[in-house]
Image: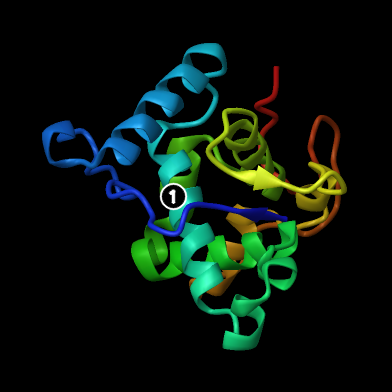
């Protein structure tokens, strides 16, 4: 799906406000995220850095033969979503659903929107065949994080009136 910079920005966990200690590429990423959020503020600032960190962490788990081949190093939306869930579990543990809610990131599609905002701003690259649909087919992040954190899911999979089939509250304009 996407490829990012070889070095990930510091501050994926919200520490990037100390701009004097950041490299110029990290500072540029913060500035880019601020511009994105001025136009579309639905996601928390740190969510963008988390996505970049998840991309890097997921790429680092690829086997060496895949890493050597630029065509195969490219991640699918589903691979990035799995990597984001794994990183969220490691970094935030049982608080991961709370952190994601705070950032406004509830669905795989939200990760995809962040990715494509970063692609449009030149921070990431995508292939012509990559689409937001690749992320819509992924898991409900809050359910995935809640279930895997050892708590039972409240999602019965049944859609009631005004519901999104257990996919959380509507937050799109």
Residue 151 visible in this rendered orientation of the protein: no
Compare residues 24 and 170 and report the one nearer the observer: 24
The crowding category of the residue bearing disc 1, from other C-alpha atoms within 10 Å (few below 14, some 14 to 19, many at least 20), is many
**Residue under the image location 79 percent in, 41 percent down:** 132
Picture quadrant where residue 80 is located: bottom right
Identify which residue is drawn at 39% across, 70% down. Answer: 90
Specify how the rendered protein is coloured.
rainbow
The front one of 15 and 166 is 15
Report x, y in % for residue 162. 81, 30
- Taking the image as shown, residue 58 lies to the left or right of residue 113, namely left
Residue at (35% x, 64% y) in the render = 91
**In the depicted structure, whether residue 108 falls above or below residue 20:** below
Measured as percent of width and height from the top left, residue 102 is found at 43, 37
Read off the residue under disc 1: 50
Q: Residue 68 placed where, x, y %?
A: 61, 78
Q: For residue 28, say whether it is visible.
A: yes
Question: Which quarter of the figure has residue 33?
Answer: top left
Instruction: Please tell me which residue is depicted at 84% across the width and 45% down the height of the picture.
Output: 133
């Amino acid at each position: 799906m996407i490829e990012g910079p070889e070095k990930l920005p510091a501050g994926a966990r919200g520490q990037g406000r100390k701009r004097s200690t950041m490299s110029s590429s990290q500072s540029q990423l913060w500035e880019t995220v601020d511009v994105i959020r001025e136009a579309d503020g639905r996601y928390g600032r740190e969510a963008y850095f988390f996505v970049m960190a998840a991309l890097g962490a997921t790429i680092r788990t690829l086997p060496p033969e895949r890493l050597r081949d630029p065509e195969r190093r490219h991640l699918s939306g589903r691979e990035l979503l799995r990597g984001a869930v794994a990183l969220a579990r490691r970094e935030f543990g049982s608080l991961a659903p709370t952190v994601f809610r705070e950032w406004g990131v509830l669905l795989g599609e939200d990760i995809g929107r962040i990715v494509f905002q970063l692609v449009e701003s030149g921070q990431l690259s995508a292939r012509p065949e990559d689409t937001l649909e690749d992320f819509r087919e992924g898991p409900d992040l809050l359910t995935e994080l809640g279930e895997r954190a050892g708590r039972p899911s409240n999602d019965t999979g049944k859609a009631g009136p005004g519901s999104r089939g257990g996919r959380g509250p509507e937050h799109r304009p």
